[in-house]
């Protein structure tokens, strides 16, 4: 499967995570930017959840409709955010919280704290790993030389 | 600023960022002033992104100057530096896309394949000193879209690209003769892959059998999640590779088989199995089976009619290594990796992929016949092309156009040039009537490459003239 090359620690992605944290902390942010960031995070968590389900299923094939789901899952996986045993639940909670914020529905402080912790984890990894740039697909060395 | 920078670390960082941005801008503008192979617009669009990133970085630095606190200024400077680094990486993405690396005529026919298949993504073609053909999709989602306060030039540049941006890599000149370009059709297959409604129902029984074999090898009754995950990943990878091979077959006919077989041989002595690719010999066999299917109307029969040569499976790849038994493959893989799940999937899946290939060709056949039937290269096309061009090519007349009437002559298709080129290269090279300084066949091969390059150039010119 040819996956898209992504700037996993690119400025754009980091900005979305940083601004997401700003929203979760209840700080001011331009309404247009708020909508964009929450929409982006919603898609990221929704796709990652679907991606994790795909991996868990006995399906053999990741088709076009699920490609970005698989990639979002892989991205969070690379960023070390998917090792806990309650993965599906965490992603669902995060997605619901983000949707709540988008529709200005009250979200409990406990849930917000969980989502903040998730985003802070991603941000810490992005900063720790530095910028890696647009990664070429890793070359997969064949065996049997 | 320079004097201030001597005593202030943040000012020093700003100065460094400003300097980088200026130098990068000069480099990007230099490149924008150059001509790219085929007059292709993709590199210019990509360079506009680079310049947009630099404009945005500059705007960050201006805001840093006006920031009310040191932390804000520091963050903005860091972001400007990161954007400059991103711009630099974007320049590296297009390394090898200039006229020094890629012949001018080659890009237009390759781009036409994209267009004919309805793939409207912005593309960039480049060459690399590596025995590798590759399609790299670059998405804007995480790379660019989320950037705060984008400069208008960046926003425009991003809007002007059809994402994902597709970079096509071919080997640079030494490893890349015109007939090999059939492999680009394989890469285009990767780009079109998502557009096809693949029907895998014919593989259901085989899927169960493979799963059982994997479980038996691992000594378990049910596959755990790691093994299932490896199964999905490897099957998806291999399925897509075989699909891309199928695309190249439909677009270029026998040229796909000749090019892939030769390229896989050139790649080295391994049998090719990996998480991303099935065995080389399996890929070759699947293509060969397609060439010989259809009896007297098959590609193979047509080829024999014009060249007196039977296309055997190892026709131009006698050195290709076959994989050993599944047990041996499993042991081999474990020597490279401790992952038993991956080793078991690879060992057991390879022999089953021939069943998946049947599903692939059925789905792709239906897709292409519905979407763009004229792009399919058929045995009848090969018959006409060899009839019209093979003898002429041996007399050093490039395959530029065909048709008996001067008014109705049609430019030769790229697939025609590739197939006539392969037929001459593999069966008639000694008969090529060109002057060479030394008698060795390799010199004739170079002359043949020159004739085919000329054919691409002049057929494109003919096409352009015809469209006026």
Image (spheres, helix red, strand yellow):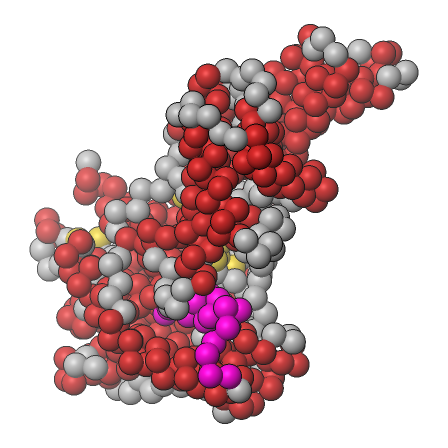
Towards the viewer: B408 or B383: B383
Q: Which residues are magenta?
A: B220-242
**Residue drawn at (17%, 54%) of the image:** B371
Work out which quarter of the rendered image holds the N terminus of chain A and state it: bottom left
Seen in the picture, residue B402 relative to B122 is either above or below; the reply is below
Please say whether residue A104 is visible from this viewpoint. yes
Q: Quadrant of residue B37?
A: top left
Image location of residue B420, percent across then percent down: 29, 69
Q: Is residue B232 magenta?
A: yes
> Where, quadrant-wise, is the C terminus of chain A in this rendering?
bottom right
Left or right: residue B360 compared with residue B238: left
The residue depicted at 52 percent of the width and 59 percent of the height is B171
Q: Main secondary structure of the magenta part?
A: helix
Residue located 41% across and 80% down the image: B211
B295 relative to B449 in the view: left or right: left
Q: Residue furthest right?
A: B7
Whether residue B165 is in magenta: the answer is no
User: Considering only vertical position in the picture, is B456 above or below B240?
Assistant: above
Task: Give the residue displayed 44% in from the left and 53% down from the top.
Answer: A51
Where is residue B411? Give x, y as percent.
22, 53
């Amino acid at each position: 499967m040819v996956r898209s090359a992504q700037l996993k620690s690119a400025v754009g992605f980091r900005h979305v995570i940083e601004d997401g944290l700003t929203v979760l902390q209840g700080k001011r942010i331009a309404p247009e930017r708020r909508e964009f960031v929450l929409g982006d995070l919603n898609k990221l968590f929704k796709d990652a959840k679907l991606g994790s389900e795909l991996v868990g299923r006995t399906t053999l094939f990741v088709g076009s409709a699920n490609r970005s789901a698989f990639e979002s899952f892989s991205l969070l996986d690379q960023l070390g955010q998917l090792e806990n045993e309650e993965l599906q639940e965490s992603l669902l909670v995060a997605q619901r919280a983000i949707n709540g914020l988008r529709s200005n529905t009250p979200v409990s402080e406990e849930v917000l704290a969980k989502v903040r912790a998730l985003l802070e984890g991603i941000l810490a990894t992005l900063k720790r790993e530095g910028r890696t740039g647009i990664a070429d697909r890793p070359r997969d060395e064949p065996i049997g030389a | 600023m320079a004097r201030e920078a001597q005593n202030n670390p943040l000012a020093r960082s700003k100065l460094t960022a400003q300097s980088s941005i200026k130098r990068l801008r000069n480099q990007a503008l230099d490149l924008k002033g150059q001509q790219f192979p085929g007059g292709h617009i993709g590199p210019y669009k990509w360079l506009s992104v680079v310049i947009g990133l630099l404009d945005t970085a500059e705007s960050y630095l201006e805001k840093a100057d006006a920031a009310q606190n040191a932390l804000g200024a520091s963050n903005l400077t860091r972001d400007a530096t990161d954007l400059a680094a991103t711009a630099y990486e974007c320049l590296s993405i297009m390394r090898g896309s200039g006229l020094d690396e890629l012949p001018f005529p080659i890009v237009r026919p390759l781009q036409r394949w994209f267009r004919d298949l309805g793939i409207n993504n912005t593309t960039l073609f480049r060459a690399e000193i590596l025995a590798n053909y590759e399609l790299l999709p670059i998405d804007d989602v995480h790379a660019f879209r989320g950037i705060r306060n984008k400069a208008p030039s960046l926003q425009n540049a991003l809007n002007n690209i059809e994402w994902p941006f597709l970079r096509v890599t071919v080997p640079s000149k030494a490893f890349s003769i015109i007939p090999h370009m059939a492999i680009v059709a394989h890469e285009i297959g990767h780009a079109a892959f998502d557009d096809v409604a693949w029907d895998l129902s014919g593989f259901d029984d085989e899927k169960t059998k493979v799963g059982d074999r994997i479980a038996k090898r691992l000594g378990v009754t049910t596959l755990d999640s790691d093994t299932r995950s490896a199964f999905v990943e490897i099957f998806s990878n291999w399925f897509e590779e075989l699909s891309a091979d199928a695309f190249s077959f439909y677009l270029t006919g026998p040229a796909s088989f000749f090019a892939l077989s030769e390229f896989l041989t050139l790649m080295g002595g391994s049998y090719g199995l990996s998480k991303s690719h099935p065995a080389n010999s399996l890929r070759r066999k699947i293509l060969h089976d397609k060439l010989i299917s259809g009896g007297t109307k098959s590609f193979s029969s047509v080829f024999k009619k014009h060249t007196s040569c039977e296309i055997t499976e190892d026709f131009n790849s006698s050195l290709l290594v076959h994989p050993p038994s599944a047990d041996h493959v499993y042991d081999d893989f474990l020597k490279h990796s401790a992952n038993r799940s991956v080793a078991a999937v690879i060992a057991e899946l390879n022999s089953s992929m021939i069943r998946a290939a049947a599903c692939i060709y059925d789905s792709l056949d239906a897709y292409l016949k519905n979407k763009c039937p004229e792009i399919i290269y058929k045995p009848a096309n090969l018959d006409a092309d060899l009839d019209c061009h093979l003898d002429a090519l041996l007399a050093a007349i490039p395959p530029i156009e065909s048709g008996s009437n001067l008014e109705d002559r049609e430019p030769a298709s790229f697939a025609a040039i590739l197939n006539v080129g392969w037929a001459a290269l593999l069966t008639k090279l000694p008969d090529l009537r060109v002057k060479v300084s030394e008698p060795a066949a390799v010199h004739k091969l170079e002359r043949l490459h020159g004739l085919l390059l000329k054919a691409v150039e002049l057929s494109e010119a003919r096409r352009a003239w015809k469209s006026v």
